[in-house]
Image: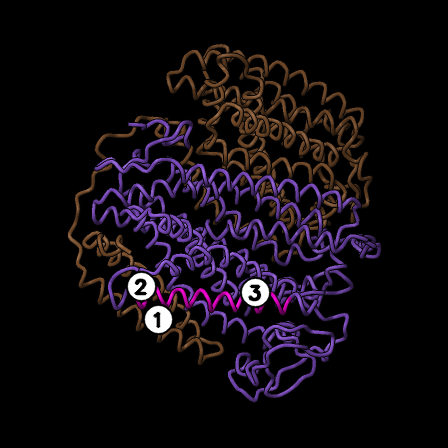
Amino acid sequence: MSELLLAAAPFAPVDQGYLFEARQMQALSFAVHIPIVCFGIAFPAFVLLLEGLWLRSGDPVYRTIAKRWSKVMLALFAVGVVTGTILSFELGLLWPSFMATFGEVFGLGFTLEAFSFFTEAIFIAVYVYGWDRLSPRAHFLAGLPIVLAGFTGSLTVISVNAWMNDPSGFTLERGRVTDVRPLSALFGNDFLWHELVHMYVAAFIVAGFLTAAVYAFGWLGGRRGRYELVALVVPLTVAALAAPAQIVVGDWAARSVARDQPVKLAAFEGLHRTESGAPVHLGGWYDGDEVRYGLPLPRLLSLLAFHDPDARVEGLEEVPAADRPPVNVVRYSFQTMVGIGFLLTGISAVYLLVWLRRRRLPRSRWFYRAVVAAGPLSVVALLAGWITTEVGRQPWVVYGHMRTEEAVTGASGIPVGYASLVLVYAGLLAAVVWILRRLARAPVDPEPGAGGVAPMPGATRPESEDGR
Amino acid sequence: MSLAEVPLVLMLVGLSAYAVLGGADFGAAFWQLAARGERRSVLREHAYRAIGPVWEANHVWLVFVLVVCWTAYPLVFASIFSTLTIPLFVAALGIILRGTAYAVHAGTAREIERRAVDGVFSLSSILTPFALGTAVGAIASGRVPVGNASGDLVTSWLNPSSLTIGCLAVATGGYVAAVYLAGDAARAGLDDVATAFRMRALGAGAVTGAVAFSALAVVAVDAGRVGDRLLEWPALAAVVASAAAGLATLTLVHRYRFEAARYGASTAVACVVLGWALAQRPELLPGLSVEEAAAGRPTLLATVVSVAVGAVVVVPALALLFGLVLRGRFDRQPAAGVAHVAPKRGSRGRAASQGRIAAGVGVAGGGMMLVFDGGPFLAIGVLALLAAVAFGSLALVAAAVADGQADESSVGGC
């Protein structure tokens, strides 16, 4: 970089009147993309589990479900491709200064992600179009790279988010990065591992409970055949084991935040003053000085954050008001996530205990109603978790180095863009709901041996040819 | 060639692949819109069917170009995206609409639904390459200065160079798609569809050639430095090669040699990208050379090595996918008998003991995670917990579905 350009500071901060709208636009795009990503991560594993059961037992019902779910998987992957592409556009459209300054530090994470994305796209096509056209063994093997790429894709994308929360691997001099060490920035990062495991497990919880919710709803309506039983048990079992594990993972994440982002941790609780033996308040409202009308649970914050009921926890007062995140948003998101997490664990415990003691599914209709509710609730928890960590990072885009207001574009017209994006995403949501309902309404007709799903008129292509 | 230029070469490869493969997808949708009369549904089905298996992979090329750009040339990426915010946002919306329409087209049952979905699909398939083409024109004609939205938000992409290159992008897609679809139909034995697309390929080839020549003339006059250099060695050689490949492709299509024509069309498109790159060299943006724009050496090295390693995985996989598609494995009638699998005897007792082991490992792993703040024991705890969830799920699912089979009345009668 020439001295001339350096002096001219081409990406000096600009005066952007619509910073909030730009943030909302980015948040909306993530809120659309992340639940779909959960299906990209977890659904291939469910489908392969079913195909594996078919290969072991020869019972065609597993294959029927696997085949049908793989079509849903492909449709959701297609939507995931576009919503992910939009995110990469928005990084440049909305946050050019962030990209110009730090692209060379974290960009590698996305370069690696592109290859996971390629692998997933290629093998998902081989898998879905390969039903009946590849040998059962080759077909099963073609599914494995999809599961693997789902993991490596999360690893590399989360490495970037972890770096934003806990930046290292560079030196910042007069607004320019020097001495960049991209590998240590992305993968030598303390935040990567707990964020990755937390998100990866969350993907199985969300995809598991959402899928189980569909069949629990059917169960309540009397659809209780063997097909529905298997389709309910597979996702529900995975989610029921993942949900309790997530509590331990969450505890690990909270301790890391306490150590490296004390301001964010203080915002989780709305802890204004630094104190030893800090409490947690359930509910209530942070008024800029303390939490009012909340239900106090003494010493719990110290216990959770440091595993010591008397530990000293730093309060928001440690940093100037301008360096604090919007406390109530973070606080309520955190409590929502944790609350739903325990609720899901409770549902899981009922399911697991009934099965272990009685070797059957619970009989109460309330259990199935709870599973129906668990589907959307798990999505709420997922999004609340991302709001907790991302709004909790504010006002920084690169924690401690660059403020969000320094990252934003100088271009005008953000409100117009935001409005158009809302409209387009509303259309996308409507279309996805519509297609999933259509796919669900196709008649289930497992034929012995062949195990094909009877095609509906104009059904997804690989099916439309083998309408026997 | 210096290290600073290597990522640029990777981007040009990605851009060519996207122009050919993504362009063919866009073009296929264009032909759906153009189809009329009784043939409409046949052509529509053929176009959807032909792009089906490769759709997602084709569009990852665009993501690849973007991520290499922002890693290796962050200042260039940021300048382009902030100044060209309008056409790039329009392209983004087009991509969402297109992807959505593609994802739902399978569920359409009634004619009115089909028309609506096809309409959105086709229009967004024209809008997106056009918008991306205007962005290319803006960069080529030097209308994107370095800086945060420093260029004119409107005239940077609403100008003669941008508009003609936008048209060229749409026309190229239509041409490549027609060649591809003709070949695909011929291979599938749909002779009348192949003939229909052959005529379209010949027509589109002529139109694309004409648009390309007018674009060359417009850019030569309008685009300043790049326009001048496009008519000099070495860029001119690429332009001539593109024209030659285009003419050869037309001849091949005329003679029903669709397979060879497919490579000819790809070469013609790649030569256009190459010509632009040679003319643009050595400046990426006005006053900003490749060397000045490039990230530091460690980042460039890491990027190049990652792409090389990634290519080892992805290139054979892509070859496998395209091999399966082009050899028609995916449109063959399903082989009889593959769905039969000999049942094996499972052991419920084994599943139960596996479940107990998984529970023990999970509790131990979770315990270690609660006790250790870092280091190898925490890592072992995490792995143990995840392994317990995975194997516990396998054991429990296997046992639960087997039980359900044996004792359906007990679960069904609640």
Residue A69: percent from left, percent from top: 38, 43
Closer mark to the observer between disc 2 and disc 3: 2
Going from N to C along the chain, the mark reached first, 2 or 1, is 1
Dividing the picture into quadrants, the one containing residue A176 is: bottom right
Residues at marks 2 and 1 on the same chain: yes
Mark 2 — on which chain does it sit? B
Query: Which secondary structure, mark 3?
Result: helix
In this picture, which residue range is highlighted in magenta? A330-354
Q: Distance between the residues labelled 2 and 3?
A: 34 Å
Residue B316 in view of the camera: no
Query: Judging from the image, what is the letter of the chain drawn in brown?
Result: B
Closer to the camera in the image, A421 or B175 = A421
- In the picture, measured across the screen, residue A450 lies left or right of residue B167, that is left
Disc 3 crowd rating (10 Å Cα; few below 14, some 14-19, many 20+) is some
Q: Residue at x 60, y 47 (%)?
A: B67
Count of marks overlaid on the render = 3
Q: Residue type at mark 1: give it.
A: Gly
Residues at marks 2 and 3 on the same chain: no
Closer to the camera in the image, B98 or B181 = B98
What label sits on residue A184 in the rendered view? 3
Q: Are marks 2 and 1 in contact (CB under 8 Å)?
A: yes
Residue A105: percent from left, percent from top: 63, 58
Residues at marks 1 and 3 on the same chain: no
Residue B72 in view of the camera: yes
Task: Examine the structure image and report whether residue A336 is included in the region drawn in magenta.
Answer: yes
Q: Residue type at mark 2: give it.
A: Gly
Q: Residue at x 30, y 26 (%)?
A: B333
Label 2: which residue? B392
Label 1: which residue? B362
The tint chain A carries is: purple
